[in-house]
Amino acid sequence: MKIEILLCPEALSLPPLAAAGVGAIARFEGIVRDLEGGRRITGLNYEAYEPMADRMIREILEDLGRVHPFHIARVHHRIGFVPVGEAAILMDVSSKHRFEAFSVLTKFLDRLKQEVPIWKRAAGVSSEIVNSQEESAAH
């Protein structure tokens, strides 16, 4: 089981994983939307307590790997300002079967939001409130 973690201020790029010896590769790209709390935004500012965030990401993946074995899990998370339309997080998981890859991916993302010290704050918030129908259509 190999784990790769990157927390950085630059735009994210995750080259494709080699598929040799695996049966599944699951990938997630978390893109910043233009609405936050019913208001238009220009982006999100992410802050992290990086040493702890790195350690906790690794611990969560190791924990999930004991239940859902995987070959490689890569998590790249942006820190600082991320404009609308760009990725705040890229993650992929390779495993023998799709169930393990999807399980690690979805369970990790749920735990990331709850347990890892990474915080987001809306930037360039509009004073205009967008009605719920427009917001629903945007998602």
Image (cartoon, grey):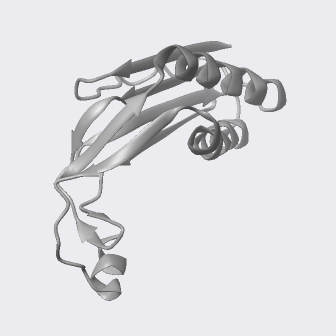
Query: In the orientation shown, which residue stands out farthest toward the front?
Result: 127
Tell me which corner region of the image, top left, top right, bottom left or bottom right, holds residue 134.
Answer: bottom left
Q: Is residue 116 left or right of residue 10?
A: right
Of 89 and 81, which appears nearest the observer?
81
* Quadrant containing the C terminus in the rendered view: bottom left
Residue 84 visible somewhere in the drawing: no
**Residue 38 on image: x %, y %:** 32, 73
Position above or below: 64 against 28: above
Q: Is residue 41 left or right of residue 137?
A: left
Q: Is residue 74 left or right of residue 88?
A: right
Residue found 48% across the figure and 38% down from its top? 27
Residue found 40% across the figure and 21% down from its top? 7
Q: Is residue 13 left or right of residue 52?
A: left
**Residue 26 on image: x %, y %:** 54, 38
Position above or below: 92 against 50: below
Tell me which corner region of the image, top left, top right, bottom left or bottom right, holds residue 112.
Answer: top right
**Residue 91 on image: x %, y %:** 47, 33
Residue found 72% across the figure and 37% down from its top? 100
Of 24 and 11, which appears nearest the observer?
11
Query: In the orientation shown, which residue stands out farthest toward the right?
Result: 67
* Quadrant containing the N terminus in the rendered view: top right
Position above or below: 90 against 6: below
- How many numbered marks appear? 0
Of 73 and 113, which appears nearest the observer?
113
Residue 92 visible somewhere in the drawing: yes
Residue found 33% across the figure and 29% down from its top? 79
**Residue 41 on image: x %, y %:** 21, 59
Position above or below: 50 against 12: above
